[in-house]
Image (spheres, grey):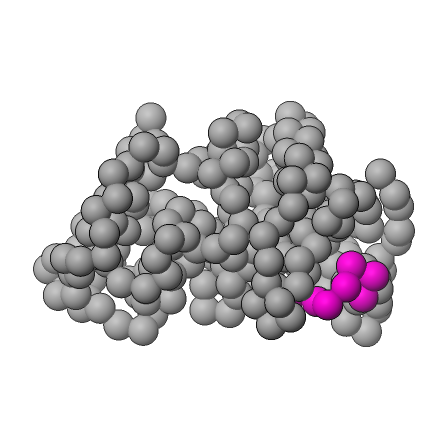
Amino acid sequence: MRLRSSPNHNARPPGIPIDTLVLHYTGMPSAEGALDRLCDSDARVSSHYLLEEDGTLWQIVPEARRAWHAGASFWRGQIDINSRSIGVEIVNPGHEWGYRTFPPAQMTALVALCRDLLARHSILPCNVVAHSDIAPDRKQDPGELFDFSFLARNGIGLFPEGVPDLGTGGIVSDAAGLLPVRADLSKTGYQVAREGAADSDLALVLTAFQRHWRPEALSGQADRGTCARLAALVGLLGS
């Protein structure tokens, strides 16, 4: 592991556990540019770690400090995610600069890092999240090409395997039909209204869910396949 110091951090509030792991992509043309930005005091953004595509790992903020990576966010009733999380920036150009798959060397190194973090902190599988999960109105990283299923098979986070593909038909859009969908999204951790017909806010949350747990179909709609995957995930949360 290589070390570089970012000035963009402050003290964690006392008594707040480190109980969340947030995964990002850098969304910049190069790893060097991303590392420079995360260490630039004018940018006022940072993470604890940056992981390059060849598996090279940088630590830029000590874990005991509050890195500035999550921004305005919400997960499982908490709003100051920076204070209770570890942030990992994964080098990838992102949707703006030529989004691509995350190479095996990078994913293997990420598994090793995450296993180490989970062993040292009280991070439950339900709290291994994407940046897009905690800020669906602002973010889409690490995105639909990131293999959350691979992480779950390696003991990191949750992913409902073996759910039959029920397709993109049977879209639920009325308020009554969406009651259980909204309830399940809330149980998962998202901030979502308890009731109401399909709207733009719900579409953002459903798209974030799909990026993480149903990347085959980023429709933002409560179709049969999405609802099945969501119900299976909630079943894992209760197990």
Residue nearer the viewer, 68 or 50:
50
Position of the C terminus, as image quadrant, is top left
Residue nearer the viewer, 70 or 236:
236
Query: Residue 42's image quarter?
Result: bottom right
Instruction: Say which residue appears at 40% left-offset and 47% top-offset.
Output: 213
Query: Residue 163's image quarter?
Result: top left
In magenta segment, residue 32: yes
Q: Position of residue 19 (x, y in %)?
A: 57, 39
Vertically, is 154 above or below 49?
above
Is residue 148 left or right of 26 when viewed as pictured? left
Vertically, is 143 above or below 49?
below
Vertically, is 149 above or below 222?
above
Instruction: Say which residue appears at 59% left-offset and 43% top-offset.
Output: 21
Q: Where is residue 116 in the image (x, y as percent from the top left)?
A: 69, 29
Instruction: Say which residue appears at 59% left-offset and 63% top-offset.
Output: 99
Is residue 188 left or right of 66 when viewed as pictured? left
Q: What stretch is highlighted in magenta?
A: 27-33
Q: Where is residue 124 in the image (x, y as percent from the top left)?
A: 51, 33
